[in-house]
């Protein structure tokens, strides 16, 4: 491994370097309040005993419990304290242990008696989800992927990965039906997991619940069901449930593309060709369907791999597809995850062109607000449907002819079947740029971004689940128009931590939290009151009822103060992964050569100020006044890239490796120009030690 020495002392350290180390120090100190007050001593979620059928009240799936900790191993990979790896592993093990013993009482996905007899009626089965869709599995899996990256030597996690993947694409360990059909290249249901395809989840009426108010219906052609409020009638609920089950139970959905990252993790561990080939074959199945659907990604396929096979011939209607609940948001997520995973495995360019083509399609229907903000349609369904559900004052593209008097509802206007107009998700646009580094993708991002979010770091851009969202401002920086971005985003990240601390302290003193999806019945409200009393009396927690409700819907997901977006962008030269199961797509990562661990060494700050197809500009500062620091720089998150050359102070060195060692003397700064050949190497979890 080539060793480079930076030994030119710096008279001053740049503000970004001081702020970056300050943010790392702050994050290192930020989680004790959660450990002390929001968890049991061994790291489990505080679980109430006062409500016998707790799952009728609590959020039925526990993906949110895992999501609440996903940034902890990523922070360790970036250079956080060693205890974050210990804590992250403790939390993952604790949640697996807890939810592997908690019984499921509703929607088991398979025959309840058989599940109970086999001991497969718990929230987790074989340490993974037994019957969940892959939008939610993908969210939860982020914690797991980061753990694998942080400590690939952990044999327990390696075994968990391979076991989950075998259940996903191979034979079911309990003898249930396999999830995947390799002939037609489809998963057999929209809900599936370690208990096989979850057909039983689709055999029930669907009644009106409060969470539906934000999203509307999945289907608009069921007799008697004009709006979701009609589901309060038992006959309508039965008919709608029958139609839903008939169409969805045996339908593949585009968001299952998110599962490719789990299989790719098995490949990163083993290098086995069958995992690589499965990812490429499965994604190609969707590419064939896309090519045959006139430039629109279909969101469903039937048992024979045919688009619309169970959906009355429609290319829309699949689970987490174009109609319900979020439309293009998760369709694009799935397409980006799949395309990036293809490129990681093959190096082939153009794998995200299908996403660019969807933006071009939606742009045909764009409307522009008075302030210049471009709005794109996010959803598509049957023309003439009554699209009346949750909205807001001043919502664009609505109709005045309401059919309900429900407060807070608006009726959406359609254009050729397209509706629900909103700003583009700038994370999608940033991933397009990270794929191409082209001026065209920068221009597209600027055109589709809100002006204020392009021009500066703004709190209004934050995506609450991972505290990110500064994607367009970051691209503005990379394109040379926002030189203060590094200091602004680091200050913003520090403010996020302090804001989170204020919220947590307020909750502990009895302040109210948002209800999220409010309880649906007096029985659930009574359960909430009982649980609140129990937490007061048994655990001494002074949480309000709304905080208790929030805790059991989202656990620590919105309470976690560890924010990593700024550190990923600035130190790694890339964008945050797609939240629902994407992998890190960055230019570089670091290892502490002396401590033999991932991440920046103590006192070291790094900034990638330029990214291009053929290389990057990287500045590394050692803020310690008397001690040198040694770090190893790796090309790509998984060693998929190759350094070609390194230029420091006018001297060029040949590297021709995915690693080089950099020694930075006390108080010194190294400004490096790194030549790079992208996607030259087989990606793996190999470390340089």
Image (cartoon, helix red, strand yellow):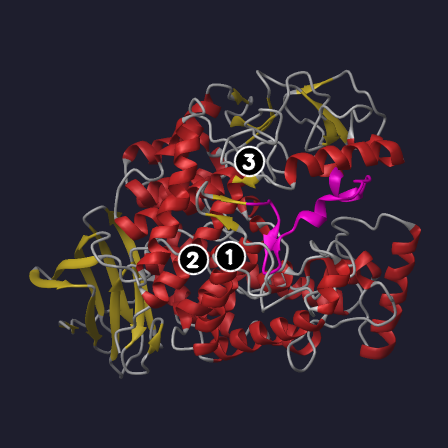
Residue 221 percent coordinates (x, y): 72, 23
Task: Tell which of 464 and 484 is nearer to you.
Answer: 464
Whether the residues at callouts 1 and 2 have beta carbons within 8 Å, the answer is yes
User: Residue at label 2?
Assistant: 263
Residue at the front extreme, as displayed: 175
- Residue at 84% across, 72% down: 49
Spatial CA span between label 1 and label 2 = 8 Å
The label number, if any, that marks residue 168 in the structure image = 1
Q: Quadrant of the N terminus?
A: bottom left
Camera-side mark, 1 or 2? 1
Residue 12 seen in the current view: yes
- Residue at 45% across, 65% down: 146
Spatial CA span between label 2 and label 3 = 22 Å
First-in-chain label (1 vs 3):
1
Task: Tell which of 198 and 541 is nearer to you.
Answer: 198
The residue stretch that appears in magenta: 188-212
With 91 as the anchor, is 119 left or right in this view? right
């Amino acid at each position: 491994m080539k060793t480079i020495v930076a030994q030119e002392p710096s008279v001053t350290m740049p503000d970004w370097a001081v702020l970056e180390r300050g943010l790392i120090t702050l994050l290192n100190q930020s989680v004790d309040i959660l450990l002390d007050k929001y968890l049991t001593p061994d790291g489990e979620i505080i679980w109430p005993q006062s409500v016998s059928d707790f799952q009728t009240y609590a959020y039925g799936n526990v993906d949110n419990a895992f999501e609440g900790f996903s940034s902890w191993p990523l922070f360790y990979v970036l250079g956080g304290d060693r205890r974050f790896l210990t804590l992250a592993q403790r939390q993952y093990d604790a949640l697996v242990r807890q939810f592997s013993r908690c019984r499921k009482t509703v929607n088991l996905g398979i025959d309840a008696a058989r599940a109970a007899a086999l001991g497969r009626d718990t929230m987790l089965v074989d340490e993974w989800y037994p019957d969940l869709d892959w939008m939610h599995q993908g969210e939860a899996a982020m914690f797991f992927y980061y753990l694998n990256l942080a400590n690939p030597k952990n044999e327990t996690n390696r075994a968990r990965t391979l076991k989950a993947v075998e259940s996903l694409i191979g034979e079911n360990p309990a003898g249930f039906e396999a999830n995947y059909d390799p002939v037609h290249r489809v998963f057999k249901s929209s809900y599936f997991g370690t208990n096989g395809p979850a057909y039983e989840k689709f055999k029930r009426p669907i009644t009106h619940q409060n969470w539906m108010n934000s999203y509307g219906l999945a289907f608009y052609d069921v007799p008697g069901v004009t709006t979701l409020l009609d589901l309060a009638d038992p006959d309508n609920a039965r008919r709608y449930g029958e139609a839903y089950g008939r169409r969805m139970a045996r339908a593949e959905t585009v968001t299952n593309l998110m599962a490719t990252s789990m299989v790719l993790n098995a490949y990163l561990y083993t290098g086995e060709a069958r995992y690589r080939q499965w990812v490429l074959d499965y994604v190609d199945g969707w590419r064939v369907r896309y090519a045959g659907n006139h430039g629109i990604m279909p969101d469903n396929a039937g048992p024979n791999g045919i688009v619309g096979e169970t959906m009355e011939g429609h290319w829309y209607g699949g689970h987490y597809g174009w109609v319900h609940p979020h439309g293009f948001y998760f369709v694009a997520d799935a397409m980006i995850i799949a395309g990036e995973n293809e490129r990681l495995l093959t190096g082939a360019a153009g794998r995200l062109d299908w996403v660019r083509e969807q933006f071009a399609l939606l742009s045909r229907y764009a409307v522009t607000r008075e302030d210049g903000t471009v709005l794109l349609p996010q959803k598509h369904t049957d023309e003439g449907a009554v699209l009346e559900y949750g909205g807001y004052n001043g919502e664009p593209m609505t109709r005045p002819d309401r059919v309900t008097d429900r407060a807070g509802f608006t009726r959406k206007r359609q254009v050729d079947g397209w509706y629900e107009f909103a700003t583009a998700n700038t994370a999608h646009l940033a991933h397009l740029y990270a794929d191409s580094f082209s001026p065209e993708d920068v221009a597209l991002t600027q055109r589709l971004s809100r002006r204020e979010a392009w021009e500066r770091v703004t709190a209004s851009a934050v995506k609450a689940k991972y505290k990110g969202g500064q994607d367009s401002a970051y691209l503005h920086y990379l394109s040379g128009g926002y030189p203060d971005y590094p200091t602004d985003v680091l200050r913003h990240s520090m403010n996020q931590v302090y804001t989170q601390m204020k919220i947590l302290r307020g909750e502990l003193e009895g302040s109210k939290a948002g209800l999220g999806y409010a309880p649906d019945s007096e029985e659930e409200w009574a359960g909430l009151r009982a649980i609140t009393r129990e937490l007061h009396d048994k655990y001494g927690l002074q949480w309000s009822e709304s905080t208790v409700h929030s805790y059991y819907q989202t656990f620590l997901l919105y309470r976690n103060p560890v924010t990593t977006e700024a550190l990923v962008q600035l130190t790694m030269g890339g964008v945050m992964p797609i939240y629902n199961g994407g992998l890190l797509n960055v230019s570089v990562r670091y290892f502490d050569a002396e401590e033999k661990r991932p991440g920046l060494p103590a006192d070291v700050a790094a900034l990638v100020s330029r990214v291009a197809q053929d290389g990057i500009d990287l500045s590394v500062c050692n803020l310690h006044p008397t001690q040198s620091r040694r770090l190893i720089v790796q090309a790509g998150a998984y060693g998929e890239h190759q350094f070609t050359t390194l230029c420091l102070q006018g001297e060029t060195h040949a590297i021709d490796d995915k690693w080089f060692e950099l020694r930075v003397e006390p108080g010194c700064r190294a400004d490096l120009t790194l030549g790079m050949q992208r996607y030259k190497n087989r990606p793996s979890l190999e470390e340089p030690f």
